Image (cartoon, grey):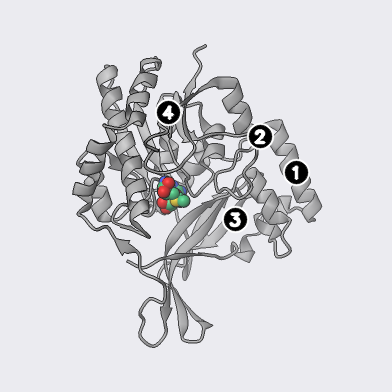
Amino acid sequence: MHVLSTLHRPPEMDARPFKDWPSSFAIALARLDEWYQEGKPFFTKNDLEDLSNQLNRRYPTRRTNAQRRLIAVKGLTGSVVLYSDLTGQIIPNQGPNEEWAVKSPYVRYVCYEKLKEVLRKPNANIVEAFYPMQIDHLMLRRAINTKKPLTPKWAECPEPVEQYLKQHLESWKKTTEYHKLEKILKLFKHDITKVINLGSGWMEFGMGLEEFSRCATQHALTIVLYQLLQKKTNNTIKHYAQDPAYTAVDILALSLHGCEVLEDPQALIEIDDDSVVFACCPGFPLKDITTDIARPAMLIWDQVHERFGARSQNPNSPRVREMIAAHYDCHRFWDQDPQHPAPFKSDLVVYIRRRK
Ligand SMILES: C[S@@+](CC[C@H](N)C(=O)[O-])C[C@H]1O[C@@H](n2cnc3c(N)ncnc32)[C@H](O)[C@@H]1O
């Protein structure tokens, strides 16, 4: 398996939303501030559902015009831009003996702060100023003459994934962190219906041993959590996971433990007040998306700090900080044993929604 890159192309120019086109970058930035301060959601379930139906082709909503398949994305003003689905295209002459083979569309989630950051760059495209969801494509860089990939190969997990995950399940139950989490669960009185694991990464391939272990540990954590919560409540609980990187082998290994893998953005649509949401360093602004769509009963997240985290792909925006301060109690459980540090350094904490 080779490393895939992402390719971004602006929306189709014949789809310009002329009505509400910002006439300058200063105006675009001011409107974003205004909407954010008014509490306007940047991500909504309706928009996620609409995109999910187009990308996962539940019914033929994808517009076509003669040769092109188009993906319609709604922005903050309600206007729609159309992105061409470039799947299957070859983009020639990208370097000496290099071409790009486009694989599939990929949602790029751009939160408020990141929309502003992009608009301040010299090559900014004002067309996408009001679009927190945009379309990228996954693509492979390859040689023109041999058609072989030019990118490095991901390393393959040294053991069968099923076994690797099983081992992590067993070893995780012996850790201080597991016992801490068990204790925290005693304080948890909400009825929940689902555990949702986001961006925990693939287990079949990785860049090094530590990475395989991180991903297996994170999946082990939510599998165990799901089992504990299932015992504790009388509800039937669902366990979902989403990461566009999963392979068929990862999906099978997870299914053996009752975890159903959903296509992006279906797991985001599942987030509601009766869910537990887990994510460690996800590669997209999950904190902002969650804050706009629900107040989940429990969040196991990288801690929300006062500092924004400008370089993070999942920053702590003011709206996220407000939600945490107003509705959640924080419990530490990770990296608590000075003798035996947790399997990987991270800032994971448990947030439990306060009862009214
Ligand atoms: C920095 S890696 C972190 C992986 C793992 N959680 C860890 O701590 O090692 C970011 C992960 O987010 C995933 N990701 C990116 N976009 C996503 C999306 N829309 N939904 C779910 N996962 C996503 C990537 O595929 C990748 O596995």
Residue 93 placed where, x, y %?
Answer: 51, 83
Q: Which-is-in-front pick, marks 2 and 3?
A: 2
Q: Which of 347 and 258 is in front in this view?
A: 347
Determine the secondary structure under disc 4: loop
Point out the residue furthest to the top here.
356
Residue drawn at x 40%, y 38% as measured from the top left? 341
Amino acid type indicated by mark 4? Phe
Determine the secondary structure under disc 2: helix
Sequence-first disc among 2 and 4: 2
Determine the secondary structure under disc 3: strand
Find residue 81 and name its label. Answer: 3
Sequence-first disc among 1 and 2: 1
- Can you say whether 198 is above or below 327 in the image? below
Sequence-first disc among 3 and 1: 1
The residues bearing labels 2 and 3 have C-alpha atoms spaced at a distance of: 28 Å
Q: Which-is-in-front pick, marks 1 and 2?
A: 2
From the image, tell me which residue sits under label 1: 31
Residue drawn at x 27%, y 51% as measured from the top left? 250
Query: So how many labels did they put on this image?
Result: 4
